[in-house]
Image (cartoon, helix red, strand yellow):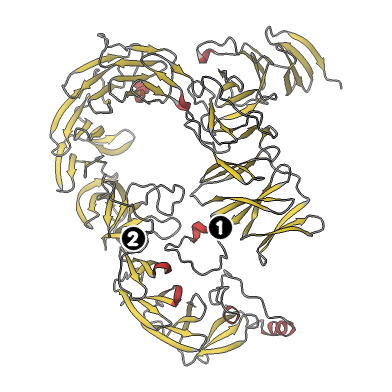
Amino acid sequence: MRRLFLGLATALILSFLVTTLRPAPVAAGDGIPDNCEYTGAAYYQANIFPRYKPQDQQLYLADWATGADVKVIAGELGDTRILGWSLDCRYLVGAVGPQTSMDTVVWDTNTATEIGRVLDAHNQPHHITWGPGDYLVVETRDGAILWNVPANTQVTLTTSFNPTSVRNFDRVRWDIKNNQLIANLSVGGRAVYDLTTGQEVAEAVNTNDSVPGTPATTVLLGGKNYDCHGDYGYHYWYNPQGQPNIYLHYSVTDQSIAVVLRDNYRSDETIQMLEANINLGTFETRGWSADCRYVAASLGAPGTDVTSTVVWDVAMGKRVGEFGDAHKIMHPIHWSYSDSSLIIETRDGAYLWVLPTDTRTLINPKVETSLAGEVGIRSFYSLEWDTAHHQLLAVAVGSANGVTAYDAQSGQQVGFYPSGGEHTPVGFKLSPDGSRILVWNADDSLFSVWNRNDGSGITLDLGSHKWGYYSSGGFFSPDSRYLVAILRDMLVWDLQNPNPDGSPTVVYQDKYFGSSQFVDNVTIQAYGGRQLNIVTGADSQAGQPDSPQATTAVAGETGESGWGKNCKGIALQYDAKQGQLQFVDAVSGAVLHSAASSRVFSWYYNWSPDCRYVYTVESTIGDPALPYDDAPLDDTYYDQRSFNLVFWDAQTGQRLGAISKPYRFETGWRVDWSPSSERALVTTPEGSFIYQPATNQKVLLIYPTKSGSAFNTAFSVYWDYARGQVYISSWWGVDGFDMQTGEGRYFFTASPGGGGCGYYGCWFDVSADNRTLYVGGDGVLGVWNLDTLEHSEIYIANGRTVGCCTISPDGRYLVLAYSTIRVWDLHNLPDNYYARKPTYVWRVAGDDIRDVRFIDNTTIEVTTSLGIQQRDVVTGAVLSDIPRTP
C-alpha cells in the first residue's frame, strides 16, 4: 500500500485539482492495514495513512486521496515497520530498528511526538493489542506490559512467556464496564487484571465459560468448574443449555499436552498445562473419568507402532501413570460410570486401575490377541459397570458361557452367572435396580434370569422364537418384575409369577412395537406414542384421541403454504447512508415508502402470497465499523450471524414487527405463509411461531403430548382454516396445532407403531374436500378422517405415489395411482397390518395417469394420455372406455 501512488501520482494530483468537495472517508474493512479504519475518527485521521521513507529516515502521514505527504511524525529513525493505530486513531505504533533488536514505539499523531518505547524485540516485532481508553498490551520475552498510553505508564502483567509462539498471551479481551483485562496465558491458564493498577484480580463478570456451582461431572481448574462431558463449547450456540466443554490437546508446534476450553471459530483456550517438551508420533484422547478429574490418551513414539496409555490427574496437573507396549492398536479401556477407575486390556491381561491410589489389579490374565478381520487384543467380550452394587460385570475370555462379577475396588471375583445354553459367547442385560441379570446365548432359544440378591435363577424359553438377531429387543420393567422380548410377536414374562415350563406369561401376537420403552411398570410405548398395557392388553393407537377436540374456524383461505411470486411492481433497496429501507416503484424507480432500519441484509427477503407483506433480514448490531464494544467477551462472530426477521406492510412501508433469529451452530430458519397471507409460520432456533403481521402477534407452537417428534428437514405446512389448525410434517408423523393458541392438538401417524417414515421423515396430503388427511412414509400410509379422527393404516409396496390418494365420498374406498391403480376397502381391512393388500390392482392403458377421481361412492374415472376410463371399484369391471380424440 505504501507504494500505491508511485506510478499514479500525476493522475491522482489531477483528480485532486478538479475535485471541489473533499474526498469521502475511507470505508472500514478495506483490507489495507495502515489507514485508520474507525469511521468515528476525525476526518483528518480517517483519510491518512503512515508512510516511512528509508531515504530520509522519516515517518510521514500521507493523504489517502492524493498520496501527498501532509505531516512529519518523527525523524532520524532506523528501519521502521508500522504495527497499527489505536482504536481512536490518535496514536500510532511502529517497530524501529534492525531485525535483531527492534523497539516498539508509540507516537501521538496529533502532536507529532514520541510517547515512549518498549525495547529489544528479536527477529520479529513485539505482538501488540490495542484496547479501549488507548490501553496497549505489548508482549515481550521479559513479560507482558500494560501501557496506559495517554498517561504513559507501563506495568508488567506477567513474566510468563512461550518461546514457541513468542507470546505471553494466546488471547486478550477487554471488559471496559468493569475496567478489566481478561487474558489467556500462552503457558496455560487464565488471568484477569485491573486496568488501572495492572494487578491480578477476580473476574468481575462470569464469562459463561464455566459451570456454576460444583456439579459432580466437572473439574475445578483455576477457581472455575469445567465440564469434560459437554457436547458444545461456550461459543457453540446451537444448544444454549449445553455446558462448556474442555478437551485434551497435543500441540505439535511446542510439543505440549494441555487441557483446553473449546471455543468455536476462534483459537481454543488453554486452561491447564500437563506436560511439555514431549515428542510424539501419534496422540489420541481416550476419554475422561466420570468426575472429570482424570483423562487418558494414547501416545505413540515417532517412527514406530508402539503406543502407551497414559492417565493424568488434571486437577494436580501431573501424570498418574502409564501402560506401555501396545502395538498397532491402542489398549482397549473402559471407564467406570461413577468412580475414578477404569479397565485396561493389555497383552498381559485385563487390569482394574484405581486412579486415586494408582492401584493396578490383574483381574483376567487370559487374552485373545487376534480378532476376526483385525489385529487386536481383548480379555473381555463385553462388560458393564454396576454402580448400585459397586461391581464390574463382564463376559470374560476363558469364561465365555457366563457373566463374571468383580468387586469394583479390589478386583476380586464375587459372582458368576451362567447362561441357559451351550453356545458362546453370551450377552447380558441388567434390570433397572440391578437386582436381576438376563443372560442369553445368541444361537439358543433359552436364556436365564438370575436374582442377584439370593443367587436363584430361572430358565426362560423362547419356544419357536430365536433370541439371536433380536437380542437387543429384551428389556425389564422399571420395577424389574416384567421382562419383555420384542420379536415379530411380543413376549412377556412375569418374573414374580413365572410359568413352570419357562414359557412366556403372555404372548401378544402381531404386536410388533419396534424399539419401545416402559413409561410405567406395566405400560410400554413405541414411536409416535402408541401404548400397550402388558398386563391387560389394552392397546392405544398412537395419537388417536377418544373424540375430536373442539376447534374454531378462523377466517382465511385453507391450503398449502405459499409465497409471493408476482410482486415485481415494488422493489426493495437499502440506503446505507440514510439508514433506510426503501420501497421503490420497479418501473420508475421512485421511492414509494421509506422507513428507518438498522443494516439490512440485501441478500434475502420474501413476499407474502398477496404481496401485502414482506419480510427482510436485518442485522441485530449497529455500525459494524465500531472498533470494540463493552462486552466482556468478543462475540462479534455470533453477533454478525444473528439477525432479525422484520415484517413490513408493503402498501404503507410501516414496520410491523420482528422475530429474532440468534445464531446457532448448523441451525436454519424458515418463513411459511398461509395462502391468503393472514399468518406465517416462522421457524427459528428459538422455537416455531405462528405470526400475524396485521396485529404483530405471535404464539409459540407447543408439541402435542403424544408426539415425541420434531419437524423434519424439508417439512410441509398445510393451513386448515376451517378447523383453525395448521398441520406440519415431522420425522414420525404429522403434528396438528391450534393456529390461535399454538397448542398441539393431534399427532397423525402413518403406521401402527407410529414410525414408518422415510429417510426424510413423513409426508402428507389433504383431500380436495379438506376432509381426509393422508400420512405416508416408507411403504406405509395412514388415512385420517379430520372430522371424526377415525383412521386406517395400510401397507403399500412403493413410497409416495403420483397425486397421492383419492377417496370415495363416503370414505370407504381408497385409490392410489402410480403405474397401476390400487383399491383398498377401508371398512374391511384384515387385523394383520401386513395382510392389508389392495382389493383390486390393475394396469391402465396409456403412458401416464393424469387424473383419478370418484364419480360416486363406487365409480372412479381415470384420465390418461389415451383417453378416459371408468371402473367399478367394488367389482373392478370396466364401465366405459372413451379414447382420446386425435
**Residue 871 in the image, given as x and y percentages of width and height:** 73, 11
| Image side of residue 681 versus residue 404, left or right | right
Q: Which residue is denoted by mark 2 in the rendering?
A: 270
Identify which residue is drawn at 71% across, 38% down: 676
| Quadrant position of residue 776 | top right
**Residue 136 in the image, given as x and y percentages of width and height:** 41, 76
**Which sits earlier in the primary sequence, circle 1 or circle 2?**
2
| Image side of residue 554 versus residue 846, left or right | left
| Image side of residue 448 versus residue 614, left or right | left
Residue 280 seen in the figure: yes
Identify which residue is drawn at 29% across, 74% down: 159
Identify which residue is drawn at 67% across, 51% down: 648
Which three-letter amino acid code belongs to the residue tagged 1?
Thr
* Label ID, residue 93: none
Identify which residue is drawn at 70% across, 34% down: 557
Q: Where the N terminus falls, by quadrant?
A: bottom right
Viewer-closest of 687 and 66: 687
Identify the residue at the far right of this view.
886
Residue 174 seen in the figure: no
The answer to whether the residues at label 1 and label 2 have Cβ atoms under 8 Å apart is no
| Quadrant position of residue 435 | top left
Of tags 1 and 2, the one toward the viewer is 1
| Quadrant position of residue 135 | bottom left
Mark 2 secondary-structure assignment:
strand
Which three-letter amino acid code belongs to the residue tagged 2?
Thr
Q: Is residue 603 above or below residue 393?
A: below
**Residue 671 in the image, given as x and y percentages of width and height:** 62, 44
How crowded pointer 1 is (Cα within 10 Å; few <14, some 14-19, many 20+) is rated as: some
Q: Is residue 355 above or below residue 77?
A: above
Viewer-closest of 500 and 100: 500
Q: CA distance from mark 1 to mark 2?
A: 31 Å
* Label ID, residue 620: 1
